[in-house]
Image: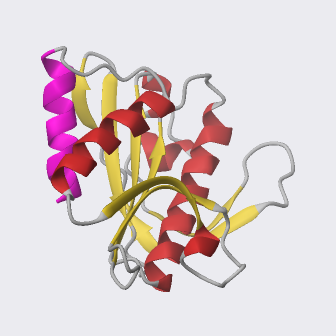
Amino acid sequence: MISEVVRDLIKGVKVGKIEIYNEFSLQHEIGILLRSRFKNQKVQFERNVSFFFHLSNFIKREIDIAIFSPDKKTLSYAIELKFPRNGQYPEQMFSFCKDIQFIEQLKKSGFKQALLIIFADDPLFYSGKGDGIYGYFRQKRKLSGLVKKPTGRKDEAINLSGSYVIEWITVSDALKYSIIEANNG
């Protein structure tokens, strides 16, 4: 269902009806499409994890987009979005990995489906040398297990329980996207 919404977004971008130029515009445009598709559910933005769970071990505090029944008995989708704008390639790639760990946590805690949707219009996010963390995003190297922060405080690391291969799909020119669904191993 979410992939259909993304396809609708892509169609709108391709014909010039929808413009995405940063992460907020991406969240806004996807939100409009989600609300039209999920009329009997709540579609909320930047929802704190504590609204759904009493656990405190989440790697992040807020869910970019949460779709759930009004009584919160059905937690349908948790969606994280990324549209990096300022280079910082290894740091952003590590941030993508943290988001993958977060969607794993959300799925394990009760969301039926949890996804990370990345849009990138800078080719250095999806092409180029494949050493280190770059290989996961540029060379389709399997992403799983322990991932260490590649710059700055190198003692920071995350641990993924699932296994992922990042597939980039072309939208137009340099703009590509990837959808990663939490699979929790």
Q: Residue at (50%, 40%) from the top-left corner?
A: 130
Residue 141 x %, y %: 42, 54
10 drawn magenta? yes
Which residue is more in the foreground, 126 or 2?
2
Q: Quadrant of the C terminus?
A: bottom left
Q: Is residue 90 left or right of residue 163?
A: right
Report whether residue 34 is seen: yes
Residue 78 x %, y %: 41, 64
Residue 27, picture quadrant: top left
Q: How is the image coloured?
A: secondary structure
Residue 112 higher or lower than 93, as above or below:
below
Residue 31 x %, y %: 34, 44
Q: Quadrant of the N terminus?
A: bottom left
Report whether residue 160 is seen: no
Residue 71 x %, y %: 38, 80
Q: Residue at (62%, 48%) from the top-left corner?
A: 95
Which residue is more in the foreground, 2 or 51?
51
2 drawn magenta? yes
Magenta span of residues:
1-15
Residue 19 higher or lower than 137, as above or below:
above
Q: Magenta stretch: dominant SS?
A: helix
Q: Is residue 49 left or right of residue 36?
A: right
Q: Residue at (28%, 65%) from the top-left corner?
A: 41
Which residue is more in the foreground, 22 or 69?
69
Q: Is residue 129 left or right of residue 7?
A: right
Residue 101 higher or lower than 154, as above or below:
below
